[in-house]
Structures are given as C-alpha cells and as structure tokens.
Image (cartoon, grey):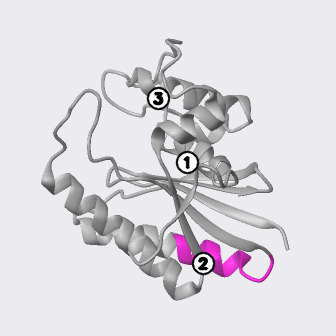
Amino acid sequence: MKLLVIGLDQSYTDTGMCLAVDGVPKYAESISFEGLKEKADKRLAVVNRLKSVVCKYKGKYQIQVVIEAIRLFSGSNPHISTAYIYSTCALIGAIYDFCYSEGIDLFWVETRSWKKAVLGSSKPSGKKLVGVKDPKKVDSVLFALKVGFRSQVSYKVERGKNKGKTRYNDNIADAICIAIAGFNKKISKKVENF
C-alpha cells in the first residue's frame, strides 16, 4: 500500500495542508478559519478537515500526518510567549488525539530540518518575491510555485489599498515542504505519548 503523508503547517491564522504520495505533493489547501474567533473552534476546524481527508483515503493508502515542531525560541525573538506555547500545544494535542483515535502515526519535523532537506538550506536565500511579506518564507513559496501549486498559494487581494495585487499563502507553501519532509525518516520524529 502506498504512503500518503498529510503535511500540516499548523497555526491559528490559517493552517496549510498538503497531501503527498510517495514523496510527491498531489494536493494543497488552506484550512480556513474565516468567521471563527475562538481557538477551540479553530482546532475543531483542523480536526474536522483531517477527519474528512482520512475518511476519503483510509484503506486506499497507509496514512501518516506530519506537523511542524513547536518552537520554544526564535532567532529574532528569544522569548516566545507562554500563551503561544499553550495554545500551540493545544492545537498539536487536538491533532494528536485525532490521529491516535484513528490509529494513524503522527510525526513532527523541525523547521530548520525540513528547510534544509527540501529547500537545500535552512537559511533564507535572500531571493525576493513581491507579495511575500516575510523574507524567510520566500524560498518555500518559490518551491511551491516550482512544483505546480501556483493556484493554491497565490491569491489576489480583494479590498483595501492593495486590492488587485498578488499575495502568497506561505502556510500552504510550508505544508507542501513539510509533507515532502515526512518521507525522510532521518528528520521526521514520531510523536508518542503526547
């Protein structure tokens, strides 16, 4: 049975999701939180979307889920807030509980590891792309465009001073990279007894 990896770039802004088979990304989307204010509702949205994907593919593929490891520090901000850590752990816990209930293995990859494995370096290349706010996200967006996911990661701003300009969803781009990294057992670690 072929391996289907569901890669998630989880956050409370929006969560990027990618489905990859045999190391090749096949589908990517953003799990929208539009209209949701409570973090519990956002966690339910992620779990419900995962549930629908698993129901569709269970029995056809061996399924595993790969998430980005929680960061307890950042190069630009050595002190990440306790509230961020608690809420992110709650989101990961909801994902873990769902995977556990379905008998699906959950893995995590560290940011620097997946960037080096998939993009070639954990450091930003310095390339520029109009429409990407964070320079650290340009490389994953360019990768997503290169592997054929332009329509999934790019969008036109619909209102405001930037109306009509192209922007990119780096959460989807990162999810594509995370899904691919999930096939690399040297860098993906199984989450157990969470």
Give SS at disc 1.
helix
Kindly identify which residue carries mark 1. 175
Q: Amino acid at mark 3?
A: Lys
Residue 58 is covered by the magenta coloring: yes
- Asked whether the residues under the numbered discs 1 and 3 touch, taking CB atoms below 8 Å apart as contact, a structural biologist would say no
Q: Which residue is mark 2?
A: 104
Mark 2 Cα within 10 Å, few/some/many (few <14, many 20+)? some
Q: Amino acid at mark 2?
A: Ile
- What range of the chain is rendered magenta? 50-60
Count neighbours of disc 3 (C-alpha within 10 A) and say few if under 14, some if 14 to 19, many if 20 or more: many
Say which label, 3 or 2, has the lower sequence index: 2
Q: Is residue 20 visible?
A: yes
Horizontal arrangement in the rendering, residue 63 relative to residue 69 (left or right): right
Question: Is 78 contained in the magenta span?
Answer: no
Mark 1 or 2: the one toward you: 2
Q: Tell me which secondary structure the magenta stretch mostly adopts.
A: helix
**Residue at point 47%, 29% (across, down):** 137
Task: Judge whether 100 appears above or below 50 on screen.
Answer: below
Q: Which quadrant of the structure image shows residue 75? A: top left
The spot of residue 116 in percent (x, y) is 58, 32
Residue located 56% across and 41% down the image? 114
Position in image of residue 77 (x %, y %): 21, 32
Q: Nearer the viewer, mark 3 or mark 2?
A: 2
User: Quick one: label 1 or label 2, which is nearer the N terminus?
Assistant: 2
Query: Circle 3 is placed at which residue position?
Result: 137
Instruction: Name the residue type under label 1.
Output: Ala
Local crowd size for mark 1, using a 10 Å CA cut-off: few (<14), some (14–19), many (≥20): many
Residue 54's image quarter?
A: bottom right
